[in-house]
Image: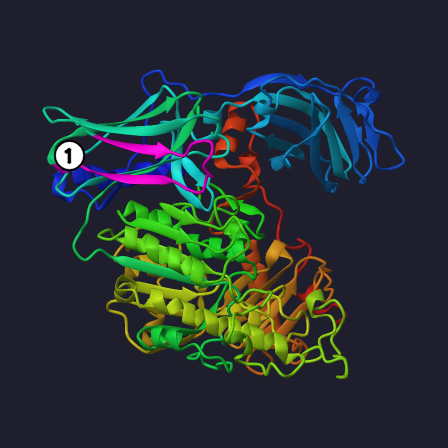
């Protein structure tokens, strides 16, 4: 399936907009997003390189030292740190005035331990100046860029010297560049596709608006009831000392009085906590073709740029559609009152959802880690193909998400996630959402994101809305609030009773927080308390009239191993307890109280939500889960799963579950597992996957292993991820400066397993 760049996605949406314009003002979609452009001849502000420093012939000039026995040396034009113990170097000052970005280019030999850097400097008075940890950006072929941005550095005056500490190696240092990056260069350029811009916990799709530049865009013929939404704000990079600043919005149409709106920006004494947003009623311009202009106005020494975001024409429609997706992190399938084999846990509100909708009894996730699972869920692309297998990977801009499909259909999109690494600063599976809330602090309890979701839903009254809510409560560490902390455990019983006999658990297979635990049921009781607390917290959202009347799905990214033989109170394995997830679906026209007993792929949920929302023509991978309601579709289908970092893979076919170790694994909290180990398990009689049945069921093991290897060799989609820590705007700027971004080599991926492996060699090895 071909990837769509942001420009291609815009072209894909053009037929909708052109049809709206040709059909008259009243056929305009409920939501039309606008892209502001700069004036004729506009060039986005660019960074200025102040210095390019190459390694000296004598490493002593940079006071270079190595952490091992071998000293740093010049090889060709690179300064080589020859050991894996890192090293350090120091450049004498003074550094150029205006410095606020440092770019360090390095090359890592194959198999080397990835390098991390720490930087420091001093000011003219000799005081230490803290420098941010540089972001690591792999470029391919072993080359890596380290980019440090410190927008407030120019206010410190001239810096005296730069010290760099290296952790890891061996590594070659190629060049150090010092840059003056203007505030507007830290934001997406006007006229381009834009990108996610974050202020505090709130993220919107935006652009940079420089001081003295008027951004404009044309408006289609306006129907009655149309409003213009605009957001503006200051990021850390664009904030400077000043008295006041504001964004003026002017809408003009020939023969009509102009309309104006001003958005005041926070001054230097105000904490930057979010966006300033307002709406301009365009009723006086109904039926006219108009043009909107945005200007940053400032008094005194004010910001040189601000962020302009969320620009859209919106209007209320009758009976706007609502689609809600709720993902409960680390939520086991059996921790649901209506599950086929429920654990002793109370979930009355989720049970009520199951009673008025469909319960998929055997839904399986595609992986056991949060970001890759959500990426699969929101793109319909399996981690095998996306190559996103860790929480540090990032979805590329060309990826097409469920939210973007809703956007192109004229819906408003809202995401509220409870962990930062799901948001724009992390994996960015929130690509395509108009409003994103992701915490900058540790994950909050469910009631916080739920209330934010309800507020954002209320703000979108009259518009069709797709809402994604992610909650984190069932994830370790389990710490439910009262009274749920004691709901499944007698508080008079000490779980760490020193007089009780020790547990016979294998050391290293459970969290150090549980050291000294004597009552194995206590963590499980807390986990169940978290689930019941979450169920109670969800009630206000589930009872929202729009949510209740619309399409609603509840699921999890993965489950949790509560009493496994390989790991406990974690999700590092591919057992049934980890991959089997709850999946509920309700909505208009869907049967109430229905149950699907066959095995289903959770990543088909995105396709199902679009179809249930009446957007069946939107291109997105997957097959509608509702086909499993047909009498001849109740047979079980194998489901492929791939573990975090590609350590192992599994294939689930009804009750039978085969796991293949793809790489040697000796991670903490998990029993060691050698590459090539195969296990066949009966999930009905052995849900913990402790009894390998390969010898008892050789034909079944051979068939499932052959099918698993074949699926791992196949590919249905191009990769959708890259390892990086910098923003989209940063990558675009680095590319403009001549740095490659490594996209060309994404199609050349290493195989998931040793090419010499075959079914017989794996099954015949000693067990």
Of 84 and 720, the residue lying toward us: 84
- In the image, residue 138 lies at what x, y percent? 62, 36
Q: Where is residue 240 in the image (x, y as percent from the top left)?
A: 48, 27
Relative to 463, residue 605 above or below? below
Q: Which residue lies furthest to the right in this view?
A: 69
Residue found at x 26% / y 37%: 14
**In this orientation, which residue lies closer to the viewer: 73 or 513?**
513
**Above or below — where is 176 with respect to 493?**
above
- Quadrant of the image occupied by residue 129: top right
Is residue 270 covered in magenta?
yes
State the residue position of label 1: 221
State the residue in front, 144 or 142.
Answer: 144
Q: What element carries label 1?
A: loop
Q: Residue at x 54, y 59 (%)?
A: 711
Q: Which stretch is magenta?
A: 260-283
Q: Where is residue 622 in the image (x, y as percent from the top left)?
A: 39, 57
Q: Can residue 690 be seen in this view?
A: yes
Q: Position of residue 491 (x, y in %)?
A: 60, 81
Work out whether 495 lies above or below 254.
below
């Amino acid at each position: 399936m071909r990837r769509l760049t942001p420009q291609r996605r815009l072209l894909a949406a053009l037929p909708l907009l052109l049809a709206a314009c040709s059909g008259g003002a009243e056929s305009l979609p409920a939501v039309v997003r606008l892209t502001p452009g700069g004036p004729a001849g506009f060039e986005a502000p660019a960074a200025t390189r102040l210095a390019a420093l190459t390694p000296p012939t004598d490493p002593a000039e940079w006071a270079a030292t190595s952490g091992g026995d071998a000293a740093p040396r010049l090889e060709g034009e690179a300064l080589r740190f020859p050991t894996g113990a890192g090293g350090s170097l120091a450049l004498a000052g003074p550094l150029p005035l205006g410095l606020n970005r440092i770019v360090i280019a390095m090359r890592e030999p194959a198999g080397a331990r990835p390098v991390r850097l720490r930087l420091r400097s001093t000011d003219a008075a000799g005081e230490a100046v803290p420098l941010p940890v540089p972001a690591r950006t792999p470029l391919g072929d072993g080359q890596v860029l380290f980019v440090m941005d410190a927008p407030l550095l120019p206010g410190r005056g001239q810096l005296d010297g730069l010290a760099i500490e290296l952790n890891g190696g061996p590594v070659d240092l190629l060049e150090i560049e010092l840059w003056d990056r203007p505030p507007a260069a830290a934001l997406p350029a006007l006229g381009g596709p834009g990108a996610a811009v974050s202020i505090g916990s709130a993220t919107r799709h935006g652009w940079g608006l420089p001081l003295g530049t008027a951004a404009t865009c044309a408006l289609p013929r306006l129907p009655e009831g149309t409003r213009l939404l605009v957001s503006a704000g200051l990021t850390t990079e664009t904030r400077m000392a000043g008295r006041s600043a504001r964004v003026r919005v002017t809408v003009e149409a020939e023969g009509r009085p102009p309309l104006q709106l001003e958005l005041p920006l926070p001054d230097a004494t105000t904490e930057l906590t979010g966006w300033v947003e307002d709406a301009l009623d365009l009723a006086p311009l109904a039926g006219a073709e108009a043009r909107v202009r945005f200007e940053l106005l400032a008094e005194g020494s004010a910001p040189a740029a601000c962020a302009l975001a969320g620009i859209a024409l919106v209007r209320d429609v009758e009976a706007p559609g609502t689609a809600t997706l709720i993902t409960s992190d680390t939520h086991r399938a059996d921790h649901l009152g209506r599950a086929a084999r429920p654990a002793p846990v109370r979930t009355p509100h989720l049970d009520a959802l199951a009673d008025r909708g469909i319960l998929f009894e055997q839904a399986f996730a595609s992986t056991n880690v949060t970001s890759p699972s959500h990426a699969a869920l929101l793109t319909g692309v399996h981690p095998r193909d996306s190559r996103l297998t860790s929480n540090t990977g990032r979805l590329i801009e060309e990826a097409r998400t469920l939210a973007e499909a809703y956007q192109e259909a004229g819906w408003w999109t809202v995401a509220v996630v409870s962990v930062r690494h799901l948001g724009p600063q992390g994996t960015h599976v929130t690509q395509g959402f108009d409003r994103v809330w992701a915490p900058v602090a540790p994950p909050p309890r469910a009631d916080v994101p739920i209330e934010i979701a309800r507020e954002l839903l209320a703000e979108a009254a009259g518009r069709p809305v797709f809402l994604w809510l992610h909650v984190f409560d069932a994830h370790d560490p389990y710490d439910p609030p009262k009274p749920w902390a004691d709901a499944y455990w007698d508080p008079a019983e000490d779980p760490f009773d020193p007089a009780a006999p020790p547990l016979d658990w294998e050391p290293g297979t459970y969290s150090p927080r549980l050291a000294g635990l004597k009552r194995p049921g206590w963590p499980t009781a807390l986990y169940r308390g978290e689930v019941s607390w979450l169920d109670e917290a969800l009630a206000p959202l589930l009872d929202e009239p729009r949510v209740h009347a619309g399409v609603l799905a509840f699921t999890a990214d993965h489950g949790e191993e509560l009493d496994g033989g390989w790991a406990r109170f974690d999700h590092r394995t591919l057992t049934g307890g980890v991959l089997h997830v709850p999946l509920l679906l309700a909505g208009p026209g869907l049967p109430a109280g229905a149950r699907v007993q066959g095995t289903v792929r959770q990543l088909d949920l995105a396709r199902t939500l679009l179809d249930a929302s009446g957007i069946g023509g939107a291109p997105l991978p997957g097959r509608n889960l509702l086909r499993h309601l047909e009498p001849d579709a109740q047979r079980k289908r194998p489901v492929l799963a791939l573990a975090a970092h590609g350590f192992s893979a599994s294939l689930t076919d009804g009750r039978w579950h085969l796991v293949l170790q793809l790489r040697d694994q000796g991670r903490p909290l998990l029993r060691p597992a050698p590459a090539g180990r195969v296990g066949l398990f009966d999930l009905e009689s052995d849900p913990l996957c402790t009894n390998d049945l390969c010898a008892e069921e050789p034909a079944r093991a051979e068939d499932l292993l052959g099918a698993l290897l074949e699926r791992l060799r196949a590919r249905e989609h191009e990769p959708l991820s890259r390892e990086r820590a910098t923003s989209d705007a940063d990558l675009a700027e680095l590319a403009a400066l001549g740095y490659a971004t490594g996209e060309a080599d994404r199609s050349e991926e290493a195989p998931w397993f040793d090419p010499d492996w075959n079914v017989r060699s794996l099954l015949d090895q000693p067990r």
